[in-house]
Image (tube, rainbow, N blue to C red):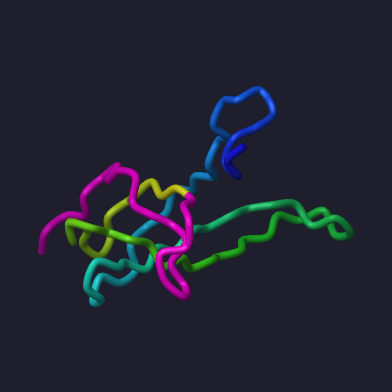
Amino acid sequence: MAATEEKSGEPAQRKTRVGHVLSDKMDKTVVVGVIRRYMHDRYKKYVKERVKYKVHDEENECAVGDKVLIEETRPISKEKRWRLSEIIERAPQV
């Protein structure tokens, strides 16, 4: 049985995140910042946490400021474990 299949034989759901492109200076790679809000257990205040993911962009179609949907995949390089699923919203051109 493959690692991505569950016991029922159907493929497992891959994790997805929505974020904004922070950098597109690398070839076939973009850096995407994802902001997550959660309530702190002790203080009951909402806390913002930003995580940066290196994302595989095969066509080099993303630009800084684009809102993108990324999904988890097999390791592509030392730090790339995510790939571009779709561009939700393009950044305004300056």
Answer with the quarter of the image where residue 13 lies. Answer: top right
Residue 78 shown in magenta: yes
Q: In the rendering, at what x and y percent does residue 82 appear?
A: 44, 57
Where 25 falls versus 15 (above or below)? below
Answer with the quarter of the image where residue 92 lies. Answer: bottom left
Looking at this view, is 25 or 43 the one in front? 25
- Give the farthest residue toward the right: 42
Q: In the rendering, at what x and y percent does residue 85 appear?
A: 34, 45
Locate the N terminus and report the quarter of the image it occupies.
top right
Where 91 falls versus 89 (above or below)? below
Q: In the rendering, at what x and y percent does residue 86 appear?
A: 30, 43
Residue 71 shown in magenta: no
The residue at the point 25 percent across, 70 percent down is 24
User: In the picture provided, is 18 more to the left or to the right than 4?
Assistant: left
User: In the picture provided, is 63 more to the left or to the right than 11?
Assistant: left
User: In the picture provided, is 77 more to the left or to the right than 44?
Assistant: left
Looking at this view, is 71 or 39 the one in front? 71
**Magenta span of residues:** 72-94
- Give the farthest residue toward the top: 8
The residue at the point 59 percent across, 35 percent down is 5
The residue at the point 27 percent across, 55 percent down is 66
- Give the farthest residue toward the front: 1
Locate the C terminus and report the quarter of the image it occupies.
bottom left
Looking at this view, is 55 or 69 the one in front? 55
The residue at the point 23 percent across, 76 percent down is 25
Q: Main secondary structure of the magenta part?
A: loop
User: In the picture provided, is 82 more to the left or to the right than 45?
Assistant: left
Number of marks in the image?
Answer: 0
Q: In the rendering, at what x and y percent does residue 77 appear?
A: 42, 71
